[in-house]
Structures are given as structure tokens and as C-alpha cells.
Image: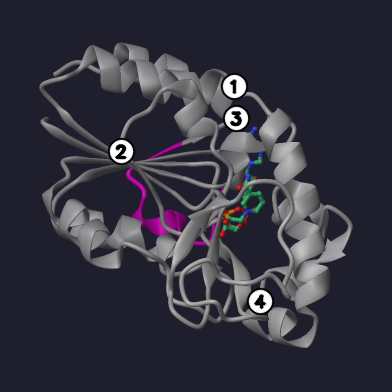
């Protein structure tokens, strides 16, 4: 086994104090998911969306990685001869804080802002506003948190597709298997011959494709598994 693909979702960050979508009953941090995480919601009320992510950014800045994030980072460090690709649906930076390298944020990052006029991406310093001015093209009223909303294409899909073709072990952690295309990665990996594992609190909608399903808190189940993996 030389190539490991790890897909993480909101559940891995739940024990760091960040709420998931599903645990919140259609509400995310007391807001309707459709209002703050869809392109229609953004078009309807961009001011609200900016306020929401400004609030979330403060929370995410304070959050610390838990044992599951750390286990992934340790696993990567201890196995320099193995390719360990980490793709996250999370916009928080807890994998980076844990020391994991080369993380792909397929749904964007809380610390970036994009100009919808020219595509320029900047690091977000402090709060963002819709009526801000792009530092590159000078356009006003085009700034958006660099987060992939429902109705938009996820990032890095070509790289991810290539990684899925070449992995021998596919591990999904804390993800409900509802949000596509990420929910379909397991079937792609399995099709190309990978062993597939799920670490989640509950069974997921795409569980048919997992060879092994370990139910429980990721901070307990994942470190045990990764520490014992032998190559
Ligand atoms: P989700 O909310 O749909 O599902 C989370 C899953 O994690 C659930 O099945 C739940 O049972 C499981 N879970 C909860 N606590 C767990 C724990 N301690 N250990 C193991 N599993 C646990 O999340 P998703 O599948 O990632 O997809 C929804 C979207 O939510 C993603 O696009 C993501 O960008 C966004 N989101 C991100 C964050 C974040 O960045 N931290 C937070 C909320 C939502």
C-alpha cells in the first residue's frame, strides 16, 4: 500500500467545537443553510452572507485541532515514503493547524476572499464586505468569501479525480455522504481497486461502497486505526 486518500468532512471538526450541517437540523450556527451556503442565498443577500462568514471566521480562528486531525498529520509525517493525500470539504484550517501538508480544500477556505469580476483571490485580513473594492481590478460589489456554495463547482476536481484513480486505501472521516461530488468519491476509489473505510458517528447514505465502517467519534476511532496501519 503506497497511496492513501483521506476525505474529511464537518464531522472531523465537530469535536473541535465547530458545528456540522446535519447536526443542526437545516440550521448552521442558527442560520438557514440555504441562506448562507447557496449561490441563490448569496445573490439575494450578500451582506448577510459576508456577516455570517465574518462571524464564522472568528470562531474558526479560535478552534484547535483535535486528536483526529493530529492523527492524520502524524500519519503523514511518519510515512514519508507513502503518498498521503488529504482532501477536505471543510473551510476551517484545522488540518493545517495540526501540521498536515498539501491539504486540498475542495469547498474553499475561510481565510480567502474572491473577486467575482476577475477571479483574483486574496487572503482575508479581518472582516469582509460585499461592497469592498477588488485590489486587482478595482471593481466594487463583487467580493465573495472564497467558499464553494451549493450551486457552484467544487475546486481541484481534476487533481482529485487523478488521486482517486491511484489510491490503494480510501478513508472518509466525518462526512454524511449526502453532498456531491464528494459523496461519490468512494465509489470512484472502489472502482479503481482501493480498500474503502468510513469513520463516522452514523451510517451514511453512500455506505454501500465502504468495505469497512467504523462508527464512533473520529477522535477515538481514527488514531487507533492509523497508528496500527502497516505497510
Ligand atoms: P455534514 O454536516 O453533512 O455531516 C457530518 C457528518 O459527521 C455526519 O454524518 C455526522 O454523523 C458525522 N459526525 C459528527 N460528529 C462526528 C464525530 N465526532 N466523529 C465522526 N463523525 C462525526 O458534513 P459534510 O459531509 O462535510 O458536508 C456538508 C458541508 O458542510 C461541506 O460542504 C462542508 O464544507 C460544510 N461544513 C463545513 C464545516 C467546517 O469547515 N468545519 C462545518 C459545517 C459545514
Residue beneath label 3, please? Answer: 216
Q: Could you tell whether 154 is left or right of 168 in the image?
A: right
**Circles 4 and 2 in contact, beta carbons < 8 Å:** no
x, y percent for residue 2: 11, 31
Secondary structure under the numbered disc 3 in the rendered image: loop
The N terminus - image quarter: top left
User: Compared with residue 6, is residue 49 higher up or lower down, i.e. above or below?
Assistant: below
Secondary structure under the numbered disc 4 in the rendered image: loop
Q: Which residues are magenta?
A: 201-213
Residue beneath label 4, please? Answer: 38
Give the distance between the C-alpha atoms of the residues marked 2 and 3, in whole angstroms: 27 Å
Q: Nearer the viewer, residue 15 or 198?
A: 15
Q: Could you tell whether 49 is left or right of 219 in the image?
A: right
Q: Quadrant of residue 13?
A: top right
Residue name at image x 36 percent, y 15 percent:
74
Residue name at image x 44 percent, y 68 percent:
120
Q: Judge whether residue 27 is colored magenta.
A: no
Secondary structure under the numbered disc 2 in the rendered image: loop
**First-in-chain label (1 vs 2):** 1
Select label 4 or label 3 by which is in front. Answer: 4
Residue beneath label 2, please? Answer: 102
Q: Badge 3, how many Cα within 10 Å: few under 14, some, many 20+?
A: some
Residue beneath label 1, please? Answer: 66
Amino acid at each position: 500500500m503506497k497511496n492513501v486518500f483521506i476525505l474529511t468532512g464537518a464531522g472531523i471538526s465537530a469535536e473541535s467545537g465547530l458545528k456540522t450541517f446535519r447536526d443542526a437540523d437545516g440550521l448552521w450556527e442558527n442560520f438557514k443553510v440555504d441562506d448562507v451556503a447557496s449561490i441563490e442565498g448569496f445573490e439575494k443577500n450578500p451582506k448577510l452572507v459576508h456577516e455570517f462568514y465574518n462571524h464564522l471566521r472568528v470562531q474558526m480562528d479560535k478552534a484547535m485541532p483535535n486528536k483526529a486531525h493530529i492523527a492524520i498529520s502524524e500519519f503523514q509525517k511518519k510515512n514519508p515514503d507513502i503518498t498521503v493525500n488529504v482532501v477536505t470539504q471543510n473551510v476551517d484550517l484545522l488540518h493545517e493547524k495540526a501540521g498536515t501538508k498539501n491539504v486540498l480544500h475542495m469547498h474553499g477556505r475561510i481565510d480567502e476572499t474572491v473577486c467575482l469580476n476577475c477571479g483574483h483571490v486574496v487572503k482575508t485580513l479581518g472582516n469582509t464586505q460585499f461592497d469592498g473594492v477588488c485590489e486587482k481590478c478595482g471593481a466594487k460589489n463583487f467580493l465573495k468569501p472564497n467558499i464553494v456554495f451549493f450551486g457552484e463547482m467544487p475546486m481541484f476536481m481534476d487533481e482529485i479525480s487523478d488521486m482517486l484513480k491511484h489510491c490503494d486505501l480510501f478513508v472518509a472521516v466525518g462526512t454524511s455522504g449526502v453532498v456531491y461530488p464528494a459523496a461519490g468519491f468512494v465509489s470512484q476509489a472502489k472502482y479503481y481497486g482501493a480498500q474503502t473505510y468510513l469513520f463516522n458517528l452514523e451510517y451514511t447514505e453512500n455506505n454501500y461502497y465502504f468495505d469497512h465502517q467504523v462508527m464512533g467519534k473520529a477522535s477515538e476511532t481514527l488514531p487507533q486505526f492509523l497508528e496500527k496501519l502497516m505497510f
